[in-house]
């Protein structure tokens, strides 16, 4: 499809052509390129090109001098028109950028339409994308970005801004933040507050809803802080938090989390640097560095992989005590599994193979160390108690893993009585032959007893 022109662009092009070659602007939205030639005609409001055949022989003037053929004349005129068009387009780019810089409006077919947005508190990357989406036939991201950059360049070189110490200092401070389009906002602030000092300009840019759209787009964690009723961070404070998070993630090799989007999530939730450090240390020292514990954790929480574990640990909504409780349960369950005993996060009622569950034991104060010695003892006694429970199940209560856990970790006398009852029955059975306790169940399980 041929290129379209706005009425103002068409007028500039026609102004530069010889008067006999000018053609009125067509109001049709489908107006196409006009190329002056002998066969031009207009139909249905369209300016179209239909060149008629032209002689190709050389022509002579009144004195016999050589003159161009009609075809050569047409080519020359076309080249002249193309040059004019290019010049007009370049001038239009600058004009559009000036309009943006000055906060004006240049009409529906120019970049100047952005001027209607730059003074809005929500002028940011999303607005640019929306603008492009609404004008797909005329604009793309590169064109819009170029207009903004050009506009900013025009602004900073204007005498009223270039020679303004407060504006220049504010620009220097904010340029360190990597914010797109902030010059446009500064120009609006200076227009509204001509006597403001640099500190006031920076404060307005960061915290005033009329001007801080670009600031909130870069430091998006402040949006969440504002909604949560938390104080917003200055650009310098925000960058310091980002650097702190980056240092932690780099030291643990967690590059996946080292990005501004994740920083914004942490900052929005008011996640303290020390808190994040404690969470990661908890994960590494008590979980990932111990295969027995990690295997138990994966069994207890199969939907989480290693990365998900760290994401959960750094989630500010996950409280540290809750994370410690889960890891403690994994440590207890890991020790049970290491002794080839039943290992479960929750209670299991399954006869001799039942268990109180690692979570319940952790809540009762059992630690990894006590679980290690306790399950060693249980592993030494359980084969005997299970065998006797099978023999005397009709006259005595069973003594399986759950009962051993109750006696070993909780000190329940009721569980101890079950063990002693089995021991008594076995002693009576063999009293006539040896008078000794064949299976050594008269004492509670203790570490090292096998």
Image (tube, rainbow, N blue to C red):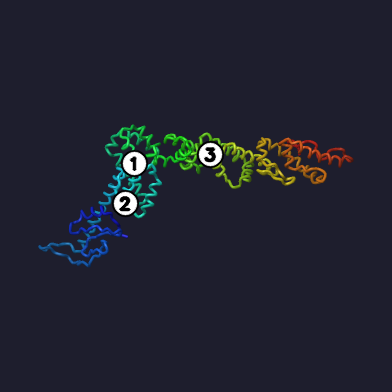
Q: Name the residue under label 3.
A: 316
Q: Mark 1 points at which residue?
A: 184
Q: In which quarter of the image is residue 338?
A: top right
Nearer mark to the viewer, of 1 and 2? 2
Q: In which quarter of the image is residue 311?
A: top right
Left/right of residue 222 with respect to residue 395 in the rendered view: left
Disc 2 secondary structure class: loop
Q: How many labels does the image show?
A: 3
What's the residue at 34%, 40% (across, down)? 183
Q: Position of residue 78 (x, y in %)?
A: 23, 59
Disc 1 secondary structure class: helix
Real-space CA distance between mark 1 and mark 2, rounded to the nearest whole angstrom? 20 Å
Left/right of residue 168 with respect to residue 338 in the rendered view: left
Badge 3 crowding class, 10 Å Cα cut-off, few under 14, some 14 to 19, many 20 or more, is many
Q: Is residue 273 visible?
A: yes
Mark 1 vs 2, N-terminal side: 2
Q: Position of residue 104 (x, y in %)?
A: 30, 45
Q: Are marks 3 and 2 in contact (CB under 8 Å)?
A: no
The N terminus, quarter of image: bottom left
Q: Position of residue 133 (x, y in %)?
A: 39, 52
The answer to whether 342 is drawn above or below residue 444 in the figure is below
The answer to whether 20 is drawn above or below residue 388 in the figure is below
What's the residue at 37%, 39% (across, down)? 210
Q: Name the residue under label 2.
A: 108
């Amino acid at each position: 499809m041929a290129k379209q022109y706005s009425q103002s662009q068409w007028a500039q092009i026609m102004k530069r052509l010889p008067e006999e070659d000018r053609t009125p602007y067509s109001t049709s939205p489908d107006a196409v390129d006009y190329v002056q030639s002998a066969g031009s005609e207009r139909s249905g409001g369209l300016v179209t090109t239909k060149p008629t055949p032209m002689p190709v022989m050389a022509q002579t003037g009144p004195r016999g001098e050589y003159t161009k053929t009609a075809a050569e004349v047409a080519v020359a005129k076309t080249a002249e028109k193309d040059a004019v068009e290019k010049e007009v387009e370049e001038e239009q780019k600058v004009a559009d950028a000036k309009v943006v810089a000055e906060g004006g409006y240049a009409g529906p077919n120019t970049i100047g339409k952005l001027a209607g947005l730059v003074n809005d508190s929500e002028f940011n990357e999303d607005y640019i994308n929306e603008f492009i989406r609404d004008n797909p036939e005329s604009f793309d991201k590169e064109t819009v970005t170029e207009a903004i950059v050009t506009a900013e360049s025009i602004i900073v070189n204007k005498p009223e801004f270039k020679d303004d110490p407060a504006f220049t200092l504010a620009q220097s401070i904010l340029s360190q933040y990597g914010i797109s389009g902030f010059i446009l906002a500064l120009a609006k602030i200076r227009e509204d507050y001509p006597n403001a000092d640099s500190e006031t300009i920076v404060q307005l840019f960061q915290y005033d809803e009329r001007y801080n759209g670009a600031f909130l787009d870069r430091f998006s964690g402040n949006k969440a802080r504002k909604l949560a009723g938390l104080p917003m961070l200055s650009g310098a404070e925000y960058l310091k938090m980002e650097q702190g998070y980056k240092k932690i993630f780099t030291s643990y090799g967690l590059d996946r989390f080292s990005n501004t989007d994740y920083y914004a999530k942490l900052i929005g939730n008011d996640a303290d640097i020390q808190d994040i450090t404690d969470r990661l240390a908890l994960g590494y020292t008590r979980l990932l560095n111990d295969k027995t514990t990690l295997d138990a954790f994966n069994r207890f929480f199969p939907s989480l992989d290693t990365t998900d574990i760290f994401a959960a640990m750094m989630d500010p909504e996950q409280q540290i005590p809750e994370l410690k409780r889960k890891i403690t349960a994994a440590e207890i369950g890991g020790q049970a599994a290491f002794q080839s005993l039943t290992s479960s996060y929750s209670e299991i009622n399954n006869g001799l193979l039942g268990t109180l569950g690692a979570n319940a034991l952790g809540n009762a104060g059992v630690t990894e160390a006590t679980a290690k010695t306790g399950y060693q003892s249980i592993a030494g006694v359980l084969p005997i108690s299970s065998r006797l429970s099978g023999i005397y199940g009709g006259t005595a209560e069973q003594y399986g893993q759950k009962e051993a856990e109750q006696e070993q970790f909780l000190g329940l006398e009721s569980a101890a009585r079950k063990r002693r009852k089995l021991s008594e029955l076995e002693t009576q059975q063999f009293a006539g032959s040896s008078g000794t306790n064949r299976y050594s169940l008269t004492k509670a399980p203790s570490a090292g007893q096998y």
